[in-house]
Amino acid sequence: MSVTIDTAPLALPSAPEPEMTPRLFRALSLASAGVLLVVVVPSNALIGLPELLNGILLAFGMLSLGCFMLARRGVFLYRTFFVILLATLDLAWFVTAGGQGSVNMWLYTGAVSAVVFFRGRRLVIAFGAFLANGCGLYFVEYRWPHLVIPYPDEWVRLLDLVSGLVFSSGTCAVVVWVVLDSYRRERRHLSETVAELERKGAEVHALRGMLPVCAWCKKVRTDTGLWTQVERYLATLPDVQLTHALCPDCQTQHFPDVPTEP
């Protein structure tokens, strides 16, 4: 009876497509839209901040929501979102007391966006543009301070700083959570792949010692699938030298007159 060995390549679990950046984009665009539309804009209206600021933030929140909806359909507007974010920072900077207001906290979101959405030379260009834009805002505020609209009082400034902290902390926390979750998924997939490799390796090791032998003619099947005589197969094995002799049964049957060797 022949014992067959499956010599096909091992079927290993396929690696998942790299999806951290799309997940981060969906998470960041949704977090930006949600925090702005649900927290920041209503709180700004309650504390009496300029309507121009709320109009800017409302527009950015709606655009962020649109980016999220498109991302769910597989359209990822990385550069568009980044440019809109920088434009929002520039417009909101002078409406909320510039460097003295909550817009400073938004800068971290811009830095995170550049690192998350771009790679290679585009990352260098985007991050450089972000830094140049931020430094330019400070310079313009220093050179032309009358362009900055101050807070009406310190209480309004305090409330705006609190809402800005909620916005920046929430978005950065979402980004960090997605990164850590993706890392854990990759680690889990790697562990499953290693376990599958070990299992397949154990199966191959156990089957390697089996030799298919024809039940009728006693030929053996080689690793290449060819059937050959046992002597030829054994001669191909390393450290094996063949010699001929007669077993006692064959000598008695075919050469009964020849004395049996002791």
Image: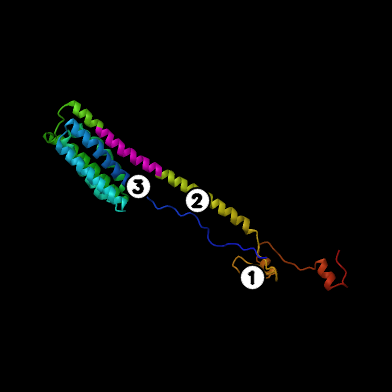
Q: Residue at x 61, y 55 (%)?
A: 205
The image shows residue 173 at horizontal and vertical percentages of: 33, 38
The image shows residue 8 at horizontal and vertical percentages of: 54, 62
The image shows residue 233 at horizontal and vertical percentages of: 66, 67
Residue 193, numbered circle? 2
Quick one: label 3 or label 2, which is nearer the N terminus? 3
Q: Residue at x 83, y 71 (%)?
A: 253
Q: CA distance from mark 3 to mark 1?
A: 55 Å
Label 1: few (<14), some or many (≥20) within 10 Å?
some
Farthest residue, direction left: 146
Quick one: label 2 or label 1, which is nearer the N terminus? 2
Which element carries disc 2, helix, strand or loop?
Answer: helix
Quick one: label 3 or label 1, which is nearer the N terminus? 3
Residue 23, numbered circle? 3
124 vs 147, left or right, is right
Residue 193 visible to an observer of this rendering? yes
Specify start and end residues of the magenta stretch as a single range: 163-181
35 vs 235, left or right, is left
